[in-house]
Image (cartoon, rainbow, N blue to C red):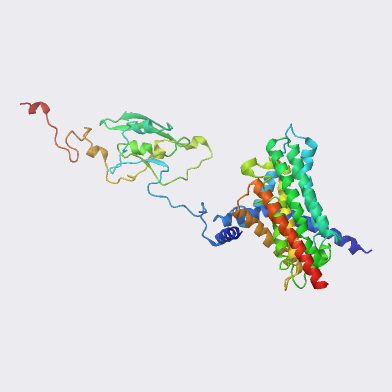
């Protein structure tokens, strides 16, 4: 084992962590700017070039805020909850293949690991809502639990078509299998369902019912302040990056593309989907809770099952 | 589903629309001539103070931000000894301007009057008085009013008939 064999993974880990945390903070700026542009405004454009230093100002503000734990809260769980979401999302990034040679691990069950970790994230929200000992927070946590359970079901199932086509759970193999044709075409249905489930998983608008500021104040993080609130925020933005990069990896050929270097292609594709998520937030109203549940179980689940059956049947027919 | 996509497309096209925001300090907003901003006290065409210290503005003011003290000069002409507007209270409703019988107090299209200290928002008469006539260039109260002051007796105002001794009209 040479020095490079040890160093390269370390460089990968540190580099990925730095990039991810910077990007997730920068997304605050990107989102505010894009939302503003779609509402015929300018957004933050005063601090630094294009308002980019707004991120720094926001960070300074959130670090200097009082970090308060309510006396009626369950202290240990209350403090633990925001850390869980950041940890689980960051762990999921371990299996994302950014480019050939860039990426932390090559798990042969990478996809399952990603699904497991994204379901673990719900613990953060539920525990946060429960430990806050506040009825709005509890309602938010309950909603999060129900939403996650129902959308988790077909989030996993919608990817089975991809797995069947690629013949592997390894994300790197799945990207390699898309060399001829990106899976967004043969797996159009799966892509649609995975996208919707992914937004629900990241608790983004229009599926931000656990948070629902107009109904539940701030839902599960009503009682959070200072950097703990910041952690939930970072977790949410990391979740968006994760879902976007998963869509890129699973359906849009990952790092593949002509001319430009692979990393650039991966980042470009990922940011396109991040922009798409922000566009969703800019244009969609939040559905009612029963509508959300009915939509999940009565529309998306049957669609996913249909997709699995159709993909499996066609594969059997073609390969014999 | 189609309507959702249409909504998203229409929101996306807003990227290329004109911004509604006015980038304020660099780009000034257009203020209408009747904009109700910073209050001033105007002068008549001769350069004298128009205010006759009648207290009507102070009475009309819903937040009681105007304070003044009436006094008289040797010719019998009334003017305020002091005139004070507390702009930290003022709500720029324009009632003082409507109440003023001599067009002395006027609101102007100017809102850039922020201060770091509350006390700096209290304007005295010398801060309020301007050298011009404001919105009514030719108007001179004492020239059209029937009031007798030094240098102008009754019946000498513009469009005013000489006074009639009503007792001489008796049959």
- Vertical position of residue A221 compared to residue A252: above or below: above
Q: Quadrant of residue B73?
A: top left
Q: Position of residue A201 (x, y in %)?
A: 73, 52
Question: In this rendering, is residue B62 above or below A273?
Answer: above
- Left or right of B158 in this view: A208: right
Q: Please state if B156 lies on the left or on the right of A45 as rendered.
A: left
Image side of residue B5 versus residue A229, left or right:
left
- Which picture quadrant has residue A221? top right
Q: Position of residue A82 (x, y in %)?
A: 76, 44
Q: In which quadrant of the rendered image does the C terminus of chain A lie?
A: bottom right
**As drawn, which residue projects farthest toward the left?**
B171
Which quadrant of the figure has residue A275? Answer: bottom right
Q: Measuring 70% from the left and 48% from the top, which residue is drawn there?
A: A233
Percent x, y of residue A248: 73, 63
Q: Can residue A98 be seen by looking at this rendering?
A: no
Residue, x 52% and y 57% (percent of image)? B19
Residue at x 78% of width, y 52% of height: A118
Pick the residue in front: A112 or A176. A112
Which residue is nearer to you in this view: A111 or A272?
A111
Residue B70 can be seen, yes or no:
yes
The one nearer the camera, A311 or A12, is A311
The relative height of residue B62 versus residue A44 in the rendered view (above or below) is above
Q: x, y (%) of residue A28? A: 66, 52
């Amino acid at each position: 084992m040479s020095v490079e064999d040890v160093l390269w993974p370390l460089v990968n880990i540190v580099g990925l962590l730095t990039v991810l945390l910077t990007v997730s903070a920068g997304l605050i700026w990107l989102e505010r700017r894009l939302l503003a542009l779609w509402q015929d405004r300018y957004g933050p454009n005063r601090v630094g070039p294009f308002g980019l230093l707004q991120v720094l100002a926001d960070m300074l503000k959130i670090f200097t805020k009082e970090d308060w734990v309510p006396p009626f809260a369950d202290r240990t769980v209350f403090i633990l909850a925001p850390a869980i979401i950041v940890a689980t999302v960051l762990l999921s990034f371990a299996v994302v293949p950014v480019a050939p040679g860039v990426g932390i691990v090559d798990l042969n069950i990478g996809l399952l690991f990603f699904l497991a970790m994204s379901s673990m994230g719900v613990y953060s929200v539920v525990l946060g809502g429960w430990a806050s000992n506040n009825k709005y927070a509890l309602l938010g946590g309950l909603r999060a639990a129900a939403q996650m359970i129902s959308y988790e079901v077909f989030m996993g199932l919608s990817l089975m078509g991809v797995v069947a086509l690629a013949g592997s759970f390894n994300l790197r193999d799945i990207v390699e299998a898309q060399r001829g044709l990106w899976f967004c075409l043969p797996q159009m249905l799966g892509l649609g369902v995975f996208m919707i489930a992914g937004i629900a998983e990241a608790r983004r608008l229009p599926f931000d019912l656990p948070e629902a500021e107009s109904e539940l104040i701030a839902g599960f993080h009503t009682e959070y302040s200072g950097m703990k609130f910041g952690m939930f925020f970072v977790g949410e933005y990391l979740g968006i990056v994760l879902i976007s990069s998963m869509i890129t990896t699973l359906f849009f050929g990952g790092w593949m593309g002509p001319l430009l270097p692979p990393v650039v292609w991966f980042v470009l594709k990922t940011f396109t989907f991040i922009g798409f998520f922000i566009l969703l937030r800019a244009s969609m109203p939040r559905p009612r809770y029963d509508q959300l549940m009915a939509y999940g179980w009565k529309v998306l689940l049957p669609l996913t099952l249909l997709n699995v059956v159709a993909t499996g049947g066609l594969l059997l027919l073609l390969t014999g | 589903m189609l309507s959702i996509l249409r909504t998203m497309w229409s929101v996306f096209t807003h990227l290329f629309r004109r911004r509604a925001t006015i980038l304020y300090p660099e780009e000034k907003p257009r203020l209408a001539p009747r904009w109700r901003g910073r209050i001033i006290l105007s002068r008549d065409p001769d350069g004298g103070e128009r205010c006759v210290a009648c207290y009507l503005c102070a009475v009309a003011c819903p937040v009681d931000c105007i304070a003044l003290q009436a006094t008289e000069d040797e010719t019998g002409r009334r003017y305020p000894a002091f005139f004070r507007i507390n702009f930290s209270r003022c709500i720029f409703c324009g009632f003082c301007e409507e109440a003023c019988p001599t067009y002395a107090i006027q609101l102007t299209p100017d809102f850039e009057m922020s201060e770091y200290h509350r006390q700096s928002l209290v304007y005295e008469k010398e801060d309020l008085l301007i050298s011009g006539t404001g919105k009514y260039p030719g108007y001179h109260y004492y020239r059209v009013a029937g009031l007798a002051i030094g240098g102008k007796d009754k019946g000498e105002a513009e469009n005013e008939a000489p006074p009639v001794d009503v007792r001489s009209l008796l049959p």
